[in-house]
Image: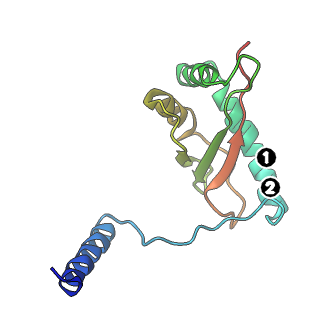
Amino acid sequence: MTGAATRPRRSSWRALATGLAAALGLAAPVQAQSLSPEAAPAAWVAYAEAATHTVKAWLEEDDEAASNLRLYLDQTRSGPDQPTPSLELKLWIAPDGVVSRVGFAPLGDPRAEADLQTSVQGRRLPPPPSGMLQPLRLAVQLEAAL
């Protein structure tokens, strides 16, 4: 087979993938929008700081999901005197403040990932500032169990 003979096939696969993405409601890849904390408006930075404290409080609650997540994170520490791994979260927040979606790097344990989702998704923060870029990216550090 020559290279010319395979070109139509490749382009048809690309067209099929594009069509499937459109049918599933998936947008074409777009460049991510983000700002460093130094470049963000003060209201956005204040909101992110408050959201970090709130999410940390949710993850420190005594319910089953939060407790299981903390136990898992405690078990993944590199040593007894080391902190738990920081959770790098992406939150999509609806205009009414409800966390509609949570993103994070895989934790390596499906149950811990479900517990993290349960502990954050669907919870309510204050409404985000007007025009704030999303997702809101947070780093949450939980205390190690002693």
- Left or right of 47? Residue 92 is left
Return the mark for residue 18. none
Q: Are marks 2 and 1 in contact (CB under 8 Å)?
A: yes
The residue that appears at 62% across and 45% down in the rendered structure is 89
- Left or right of 38? Residue 31 is left
The residue that appears at 62% across and 50% down in the rendered structure is 97
Seen from this angle, which residue lies furthest front?
A: 2
Q: Callout 2 environment at 10 Å: few (<14), some (14 to 19), or many (20+)?
A: some
Amino acid tagged 1: Glu
Return the mark for residue 45. 2
Placement of 7 over or under 13, stated as above or below: below
Residue 81: percent from left, percent from top: 77, 19
Q: Which residue is mark 1?
A: 49
Placement of 109 over or under 24, stated as above or below: above
Residue 49: percent from left, percent from top: 79, 46
Q: Callout 1 environment at 10 Å: few (<14), some (14 to 19), or many (20+)?
A: few
Residue 43: percent from left, percent from top: 81, 59
